[in-house]
Image (cartoon, grey):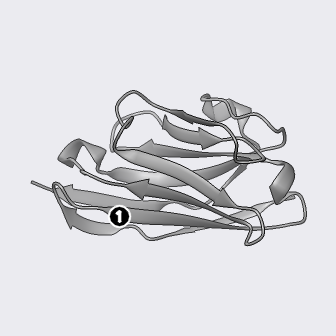
Amino acid sequence: QVQLVESGGGLVQAGGSLRLSCAASGRTFSSCAMGWFRQAPGKERAFVAGISASGGSTLYANSVKGRFSISRDNAKNTVYLQMNSLKPEDTAVYYCAARSASWMLSRPDEYNYWGQGTQVTVSS
């Protein structure tokens, strides 16, 4: 069992930066691939970024490539999402997810555990 708690969301102007954190409980964190997803009002939950259990491999949605960076600290049971050059279209609730496997995937149904989400709002 893995419990996830996101933090770091907020209101930021376009072009600004935010760093989201996701703290995980449970002894299996270091064996889980992790992902960040987002959901805007009226839209489906969409993949943003993923990282393998070791942290050695990452995957990004085309819409955030070059602007967002995912990382993890297995000693702290935490995964991060650094978001730079934010745009109004990045506004959404951001969710952290854990997958009971070492490799990250981009489909929400491939992830077993979810956090409660944190709101990110980017003003123009």
Q: Is 41 in front, or is 122?
A: 122
Residue at figure coordinates x 65%, y 49% from the top left: 97
Q: Position of residue 107 (x, y in %)?
A: 62, 28
Residue 18 picture quarter: bottom left
Q: Is 69 in front, or is 3?
A: 69
Q: Is 2 in front, or is 17?
A: 17
Q: Position of residue 84 (x, y in %)?
A: 31, 54
Please give the residue where the numbered disc 1 appears in the rendered image. 18
Screen quadrant of the C terminus: bottom left
Q: Secondary structure at mark 1?
A: strand
Residue 50 picture quarter: top right
Screen quadrant of the N terminus: bottom right
Would residue 81 be found to the left or right of residue 64 on screen? right
Q: Residue furthest front?
A: 56
Total numbered labels: 1
- Residue 29 against residue 6 in the figure, above or below: above
Would residue 110 be found to the left or right of residue 35 on screen? right
Q: Amino acid at mark 1?
A: Leu
Residue at figure coordinates x 90%, y 65% from the top left: 27
Residue 121 picture quarter: bottom left
Q: Residue furthest left?
A: 124
Q: Is 18 in front, or is 112?
A: 18
Residue at figure coordinates x 70%, y 42% from the top left: 56
Would residue 102 be found to the left or right of residue 89 on screen? right
Residue at figure coordinates x 39%, y 27% from the top left: 62
Residues packed near mark 1 inside 10 Å, few (<14), some (14 to 19) or many (20 plus) = some
